[in-house]
Image (tube, rainbow, N blue to C red):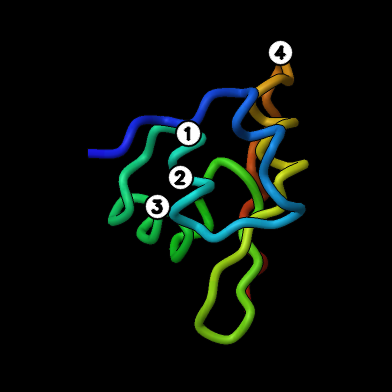
């Protein structure tokens, strides 16, 4: 089992990371992370590039350090 990332470790990450790395910052498992990403309910915006999911490190840092988290917007109906 992997340990969650510390805030210091998150600050050392590259500009964007894969979904599993982002999930570790929030102490989420891989399966739950992918489920939340597919449902547009991951704690921060997830960007899909082909089959890959990417998360901006600044979004992770903002979510972890912001005293008042903002709600995730609902997906637009198509």
Checking the image for residue 26, the label placed there is: 1
Mark nearer the N terminus (3 vs 1): 1
* Residue 6 pos. (x, y %): 53, 24
Checking the image for residue 67, the label placed there is: 4
Checking the image for residue 63, the label placed there is: none
Label 1's element? loop
Mark nearer the N terminus (2 vs 3): 2
Label 4's element? loop
Please tell me how crowded label 3 is: few (under 14), some (14-19), or many (20+) other residues with Cα within 10 Å: many
* Residue 64 pos. (x, y %): 64, 25
- The reply to whether discs 4 and 2 touch (Cβ–Cβ < 8 Å) is no
- What residue would you read off at disc 3? 33
Quote the CA–CA distance across marks 4 and 3: 23 Å
Query: From the viewer's perspective, is 61 left or right of 52?
Result: right
The quadrant of the rendering that contains the N terminus is: top left
Label 3's element? helix
Residue at image coords 65%, 66%: 47
């Amino acid at each position: 089992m992997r340990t969650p990332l510390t805030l210091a470790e998150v600050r050392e990450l590259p500009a964007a990371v894969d979904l599993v790395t982002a999930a570790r910052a929030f102490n989420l498992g891989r399966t739950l992370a992918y489920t939340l990403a597919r449902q547009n309910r991951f704690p921060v915006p997830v960007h899909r590039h082909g089959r890959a999911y990417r998360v901006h490190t600044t979004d992770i840092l903002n979510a972890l350090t912001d005293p008042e988290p903002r709600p995730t917007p609902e997906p637009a109906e198509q």
